Every structure is written in C-alpha cells, then in structure tokens.
C-alpha cells in the first residue's frame, strides 16, 4: 500500500470539515469498544496478564532467530509449505505461483492488516483473480473502494444510512433495510464465493513455534470458512507474530479478545496445524509466508523495537481521543491511531510518516489500554525528537521553539515577553502560533498582572 | 543469498549484544470450583444455548429438525435424523473434543468434519461432561496430538459491522446449542 | 516546612490569581512559601514537540533555580510531571534532575500526600463543580482522588461527567499544529459538560483551551484553576 501519511494534518482537517458523520460514527463505535474493554479488563488480574504477555513477547523477540527456525521446522513437519518474504514482491511471487499452478479464478480473503501492507488484492486482481473480502466490514469497504479505518472494525466510520444506500445501489435492497436483512444479503453473496473459491487467504494472530500452529481469531466465521473450504490456503504472517509454546495461547487468545472487543474469547478461534489429512475436509495445500517488510529494521531500533509486541487488537485506537475525531483514513497508512503513529515511522521511514507522531496530545490513554504495555507516549516523544533532529519539522516551528527558548532562558526577556502579551509587540516568530490559537478560541486574555508581579504584593501583604 | 538467509542474518545482527528476556512460566491456576455450572453460564452470556442432559434429553434436542449434517465422531445414538449434505442441512451436529468453562467454548476437531461445524444455520455440539475443563490453560496443556485444524467456538456467528448493530448468523451458524452429556 | 512555588509560565500569564490563591492557602496551612524569582518555563512545550535541544537548557536552569528548595509545588499537573518524569529522561545521569523529581509535587498532591490535609474548610458548600482530569496529572502523576477529595470535603458537589477523564485536546503545540482536531476534541468534551457553576482542573493549559472554546461557542460557565477553588474552600 502506498503511504500518504505526510498529508495527515490536511486530511484530518478536511475530513472534520467535509464528513462530520465520520466523527460521530467513530466516536460512538470506539467508546462502545472502550466500555467493553474496561469491563473485560476489570474481570481478570489484568496487570499480571499484561506483564506476562509483555515478557513472553520480549522473550520471543530477543530470541527471534531461534523461534523463526523452530517454527519453520515444525510447519514443514506438519506439511505446510514455508516461504520467506522481505518485500511485497517476494510475497507476490508466492501468490503468482499458486494462482498459475492451481488455476485460481476466485479467492476468499479473511481480514488481515499485513495483506494491506503487501498489496495482495491489487496483485491478485492484476492476475485476473476475483478477490472477495469476507469479513463483513471489510466487504463493505471493498465495495466502496476504501481502505480499512480501524484494525478491528474496518468500517466503523460508516453509518447505517451509508450502508443502506450502498446495498440499495448494489443489490437493490430497500433504502430502509434492517442490518439483519443487509447481513443476509452479504451472507448469500459470500457463501457462494466460499463454496466456489479455489484459494483462501488469511493473516494470523499468532504462530506457535513449538507446534507450528497458526492461530486466528474472529467473530463471523469467515476465517474458519476461508481456511477450510478452498483447496489452497495461504497465510501471511509477520515475523513478530511468534509465540514460543502452544499453551501460551491460553494467555494471548483471551487477552487479545478482551483488549479488542471486551470478549472472553473471540467467537471463533482457528488453530491450524496444516493441510487436511487423509479423508478429511479442508485445504490440500497450506502455505505460510513469513514476512519481514520493515520488521527487522524495527527490531534493530533500540527504542522502537517494543512496537513489535503489538497484537493488532485496536485497543489503543479505541482509547485515543485524537483517533476518535477522524477514524483511521487521514493517517494515510495501514496502521492508524496511536500504534500507527509509532509503528508507521518504523515500517516506512520517519520522513514518509513524519506528521503521525504528532497526531497525539500525549494523554497516555493508549498506554493504559495496551495489552502488551507498549510505551506509546514515550515512543511518540522519541519519534518527535528524531524528527526535530533530522530537520523534518517545519521551519516556522523551529524558529518558534528557538525564540521560545531564548525568551525563557532569560528572566529579563521573559518579563519583557510578559509585557508584550499585555500590549507590546511579540517576537515575530511566535505570531503564526498565536494566529492558529486564536482562530478557534478567541483572543488570549492574560491576567491583568502576571503572578510574578503580584508576588511582591502577596509577599508584602503576607 | 535468499530472503530467508537475509532475514535471519538481519535478525541476528539486530539482536547482537541485546539483553535477552526470560520466558515466564505458565501461571499455576486454582481449579475452577464448578466448571459445569460456569460453562453453562458463560455459554449463555456468549449468546449460545447450553443444556446439561442425559442421552435421552440430547436426542430430544434433535427432534424438530428435518435432517442434519453429522460430524464423523457423532455416536450412532444421536444420528437419528436423515443425513443431509452440510451445504443444505438446517442443522450441523458435532462431537467436541473438549469444552472450556471460563470462556464458554467448545473445541472441534478438523477430523470430525469442518463443513458440518460451519455451513448449517444451526450448530448442535455434543460434549461429554468429563471433557469440560475449568480453564483454557488446562485444556491446552492436556491436549495430545493436534488435529489439522482445531476450532474453538464460543457462540453464534455475529458482527456489528453494519452501523454498530449486533447481527447474528453472518457467515457461520447463527445459533449454537451445546449439549453437555452426563 | 518551606515550599518553593513554581508558578509555571502559563499560570503566571493567564491564571495569576491561582498563584495568589496557592500562596495564601499554603501559608494558611502553616507552610512558608518562597517564590524563586529566576523561574520561567519548565521547557515542556519544546520537549513534547521533540525539540529537546531547546528544552534542555530550560530544564537545566530550572534545576538551578530550585536547587535550594525543600519542596517544589506547582499548580499544574503537566509541568509537575515534566519535572518528575521527563527531566530525568531529558538529562540522563543528572543527579540534580533526580533530586528535583523527588521533591516536586502538584498542589493537591502536596496537600493530601505530604501535608496530610484532606479538609480545607467548608467554603464550597453546595457548589456544583465540573472537574476535568488533566491527562498528565491523572495518568503520569496518578493524581486522581486528591482534587476530588479536597473539593468534596469542602462541600462541593463534583458532578458526574462521562468525558471527565478524556483529553480536552490542548496538548501544547498540538493545539496549534492540528487545530481542527484539537477543537473537535474540546467540542466533544464541552458537549458532555454537566450543568455546573464552575469548571476546574489542575492544569492552566487545559483551562485556557476549554475556556477559549467556550467563549467562542457562547458558553458562559465560570472557569477557575483548582488552586483558586481550594483557596475558596478554605476561606469561604
């Protein structure tokens, strides 16, 4: 996927101006997720869970070469074909081979953020394959030609009215059709696709090294169907998705569910060990593509490597008051919200993702929500610091910060500035800031006298 | 050099001189006091139907369906409906490997047949009472020999993707009935 | 006991009365108050925006200004957290930074946790108060109960407010780098505001942002820093 993260400030402003409905839909949905998460966290010793999950992930990441080799060995023993992909092109090559060899005309796809990164759909379409996104939300945005706006709820920016209009135009359903009726239409279309597709595509929530198990979580049943009905299943797995032991799933499956949707477990969990065995229903071929695409570079980063713990639960998006105003589209890349703001600069480059670390007030709600304790606020600061060091911040900002430092370094200048606020001219460099402030909030109204002048009166008056 | 070699080399380079994190042990959980009651409660909270039944009672559950698709492991005693292909059957009947009380889940093996678990609009799962674990950890630690695919089902298929309204039966079964056999 | 008041630049300029209130309150509780005159800004705006080279000299000079103080008290959660949590990060290995972090408190935190005061008086009897949890006070300092305790024990009714722990959208430079998002956040906060007589918070930045937005929207609610209300709690 081409990143448009640079446009974040403009796109966020434009969306707020032109599509106020998105803010309403996203706020409603994320607050709902957030209430459920809080309830689900309160039911268990969540601090212990988070600490343990963080420790397991840190262990895997600091022994990643070992676990990758172990996972590969186990997968092969299970009859799975293992491929390695550094780049989207590497992943495309695997798909191209499968499509040609098996004569694939139709593919059903389970929601996967990694396949967004890799541009799997455009590739398959270019090969003449009809691709069906089968997660209901993902299907909706595929019909609209939009990217997902949330890791877990890709269509949360859409209102019921918009979906009714979409289905009316597409399938002739009445404009006031109920969500149940609309879902039944989608079920019929996609059921047909499940039964006829030659290829099933998925990501993975986890890959267990000990047993070579792919673990996938969902609520609709589309992942179970996508990985069970077609004759070939290809799973794309980021190399950070490993877990050491099968029993680690007993922590990570419930933890992810609680963080993502407030459930005790996702409605359907698929634990896949390989192709169907003699006489069984299920795929004849299972492929796992282990994908780097920027992850080894992140692992190298002594600070940002902690983002590799991410479970893609979306809890930080739901908790984020900045994300809530716009949803994910203005962020301009696969991962949005707080985790996007710290992950995208690592997966892309800081230059390409520059504005994203600034898409936060540093309120800290994301850190409290994160099931693996990724220090998102600290990493936001780290990326901002690097951006300033590399000269990526705008020159007016540099000028303003330098002027600010000069003023604040000297009590005498500060006192002069203080008078400036009350009528005398202010340093030119600070004027753009003042304008951006007053437009939405009215003129600044300083106290008649600053405290440092009042102090003398208080000090004398005791 | 191929992608594999390059990726592993970069991982090793990144981890050189990196402090290694220890792998924590699994927690030692207290056994759940009454896993059966908890299981039935959690199933209900997940939007599924749970029943504690003897064989006769479970057979009665099947009445009223014109036919069913059966999993391979379902004992003869419960195959009392005309067998239909899963694509057409109004009911799928499965035999669970085990169940988990704390999450309200049944575990279904690929060996039993995946279509009956997924295609019909209603899914009836039979599980022996002695196979109900208190916690997911116990269940996973106890598992010997993994099937090609293990499915954990904890309720009816559902989605809130359309206008945040919860809808059941989106792709998988919209109704999950679990009969715990005494 | 002797306290050095760190008024912080925003309160100095925009909520000077909060400084007066803090001084009077501390003195009334038997604490001697100094106001080191060299103080300016803690450097947080530059630090949070990534301009650490501009923030560092400000942090260093702040350490010098408050070197002699027994305690440093701020009528601001955000600036207190800058000193307590971020100075040691900004100046790694700097002993003075660790020492200052140890002795620095947000005002309500100081009253409750150091002075052990939970009741200031009954000056807020029957007053309906909306309390905004400043994010850094709440999540970085863990100041959640202290302000509520002091307000409620003085007779104030702190009204339930669904969004009271949500960020108001100020965020320092954020408010001018992403003004539309910042204002949308303020609007969400204000749309859920309960019917109070006064809106208060530990942080001048949040209050400046919210009161500016309220003015723009024609909302006429009184906005007062927590220090001001705590003095009223004492003095009636």
Image (cartoon, coloured by chain):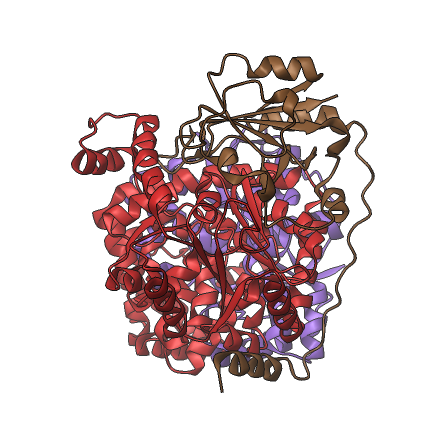
Residue A233, picture quadrant: bottom left
Residue placed at 52% from the left, 51% from the top? A313
* Image quarter of residue A40: top right
Task: Classify the position of the C terminus of chain C by image quarter.
Answer: top right
Q: Is residue B141 left or right of residue C218?
A: right
- Identify the colour of chain C in the image: purple
Question: Which chain: red?
Answer: A
Where residue A238 appears, as percent x and y from the top left, is 51, 65
Locate residue B148 relative to residue B134 in the image: left or right.
left
In the image, which lettered chain appears brown?
Answer: B
Q: Is residue C124 visible?
A: yes
Residue B57 vs A23, above or below: the answer is above
Quadrant of the image occupied by residue B78: top right
Closest to the observer: A178 or A372? Answer: A178
Q: Depth check: give the residue in front, B60 or C202.
A: B60
- The percent position of residue A194, horizontal first and vertical second, equals 37, 43
Q: Along the line of sight, which residue is nearer the eye, B6 or A339?
A: B6
Which part of the image, by quadrant, shows the N terminus of chain C?
bottom right
Residue at x 70% of width, y 33% of height: B101
Where is residue C76? Give x, y as percent: 56, 56
Q: Residue furthest bottom?
A: B1
- Percent from the top left, x then y, of residue A325? 36, 48
Closer to us: A283 or C208? A283
Report whether residue C163 is seen. Answer: no
């Amino acid at each position: 996927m081409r990143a448009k993260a640079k446009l974040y400030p403009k796109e966020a402003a434009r969306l707020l101006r032109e599509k106020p409905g998105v803010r309403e839909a996203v706020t409603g949905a994320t607050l709902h997720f957030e209430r459920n998460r809080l309830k689900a966290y309160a039911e268990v010793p969540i601090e212990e869970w988070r600490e343990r999950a963080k420790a397991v992930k840190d262990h895997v990441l600091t022994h990643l070469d070992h676990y990758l080799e172990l996972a590969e060995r186990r997968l092969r023993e299970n009859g799975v074909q293992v491929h390695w992909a550094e780049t989207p092109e590497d992943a495309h090559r695997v798909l191209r081979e499968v499509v040609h060899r098996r004569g694939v005309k139709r593919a059903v796809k389970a929601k996967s953020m990694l396949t967004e990164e890799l541009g799997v759909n455009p590739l398959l379409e270019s090969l003449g394959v009809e691709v069906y996104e089968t997660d209901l939300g993902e299907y909706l945005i595929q019909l609209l030609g939009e990217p997902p706006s949330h890791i877990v709820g890709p269509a949360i920016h859409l209102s019921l009215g918009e979906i009714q209009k979409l289905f009316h135009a597409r399938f002739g359903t009445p404009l006031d059709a109920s969500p149940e009726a609309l879902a039944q239409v989608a079920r019929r279309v996609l059921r047909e696709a499940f039964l006829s597709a030659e290829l099933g595509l998925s990501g993975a929530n986890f890959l267990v090294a000990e047993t070579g198990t792919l673990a996938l979580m969902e609520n609709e049943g589309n992942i179970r169907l996508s990985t069970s009905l077609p004759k070939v299943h290809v799973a794309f797995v980021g190399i950070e998705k490993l877990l050491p032991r099968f029993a680690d799933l007993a922590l990570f499956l419930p933890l992810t569910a609680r963080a993502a949707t407030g459930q005790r477990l996702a409605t359907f969990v698929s634990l896949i060990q390989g192709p169907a065995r003699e006489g069984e229903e299920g795929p004849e071929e299972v492929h796992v593509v282990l994908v780097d695409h920027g992850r080894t570079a992140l692992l190298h980063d002594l600070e940002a490597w902690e983002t590799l713990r991410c479970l893609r639960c979306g809890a930080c998006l739901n908790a984020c008051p900045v994300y809530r105003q716009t949803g994910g589209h203005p962020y301009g890349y696969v991962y949005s919200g707080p985790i996007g703001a710290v992950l995208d600069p690592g997966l892309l480059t800081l230059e390409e993702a520059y504005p994203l670390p600034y898409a936060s007030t540093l309120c800290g709600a994301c850190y409290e929500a994160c099931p693996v304790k990724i220090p998102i606020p600290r990493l936001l600061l780290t990326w901002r610091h690097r951006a300033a060091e590399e000269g990526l911040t705008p020159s007016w900002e540099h000028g303003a910060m330098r002027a600010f430092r000069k003023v604040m370094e000297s009590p005498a200048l500060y006192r002069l500035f203080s008078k400036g606020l009350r009528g005398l001219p202010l340093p030119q460099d600070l004027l753009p800031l003042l304008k951006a402030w007053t437009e939405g909030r009215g003129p600044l109204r300083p106290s008649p006298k600053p405290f440092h002048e009042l102090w003398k009166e208080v000090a004398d008056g005791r | 050099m191929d992608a594999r070699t390059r990726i592993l080399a970069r991982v090793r380079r990144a981890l050189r001189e990196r402090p290694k994190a220890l792998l924590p042990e699994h927690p030692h959980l207290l056994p759940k006091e009454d896993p059966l009651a908890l299981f039935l409660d959690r199933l209900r909270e997940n939007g599924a139907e749970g029943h504690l039944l003897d064989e006769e009672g479970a057979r009665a559950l099947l009445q009223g369906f014109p036919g069913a698709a059966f999993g391979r492991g379902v004992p003869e005693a419960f195959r009392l409906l005309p067998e239909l292909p899963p694509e057409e059957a109004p009911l799928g009947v499965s035999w669970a490997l085990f169940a988990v009380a704390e999450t309200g889940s049944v575990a279904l093996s690929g060996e039993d047949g995946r279509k009956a678990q997924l295609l019909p609009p209603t899914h009836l799962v039979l599980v022996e009472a002695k196979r109900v674990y208190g916690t997911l950890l116990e269940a996973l630690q106890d598992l010997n020999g993994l099937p090609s695919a293990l499915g954990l089902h904890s309720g009816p298929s559902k989605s809130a993707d359309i206008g945040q309204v919860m809808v059941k039966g989106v792709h998988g079964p919209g109704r999950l009935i679990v009969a715990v056999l005494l | 006991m002797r306290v050095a008041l760190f008024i912080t630049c925003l309160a100095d300029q925009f909520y000077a009365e909060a400084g007066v209130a803090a001084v009077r309150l501390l003195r009334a509780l038997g604490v001697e108050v100094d106001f080191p005159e060299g103080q300016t800004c803690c450097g947080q705006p530059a630090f949070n925006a990534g301009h650490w080279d501009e923030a560092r000299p400000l942090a260093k000079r702040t350490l010098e200004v408050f070197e002699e103080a027994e305690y440093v008290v701020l009528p601001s959660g955000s600036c207190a957290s800058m000193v307590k949590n971020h100075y040691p990060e900004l100046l790694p290995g700097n002993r003075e930074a660790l020492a200052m972090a140890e002795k620095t408190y947000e005002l309500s935190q100081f009253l409750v946790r150091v002075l052990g005061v939970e009741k200031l008086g009954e000056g807020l009897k029957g007053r309906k108060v909306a309390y905004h949890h400043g994010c850094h006070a709440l999540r970085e300092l863990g100041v959640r109960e202290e302000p509520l305790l002091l307000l409620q024990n003085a007779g104030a009714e702190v009204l339930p407010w669904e969004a009271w722990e949500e960020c108001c959208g100020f965020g320092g430079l954020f408010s001018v780098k992403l003004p539309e998002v910042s204002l949308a956040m303020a609007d969400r906060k204000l749309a859920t505001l309960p019917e109070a007589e006064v809106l208060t918070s530990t942080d001048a930045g949040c209050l400046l942002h919210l009161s500016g937005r309220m003015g723009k929207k024609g909302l006429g609610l009184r906005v007062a820093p927590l220090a001001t209300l705590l003095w009223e709690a004492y003095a009636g």
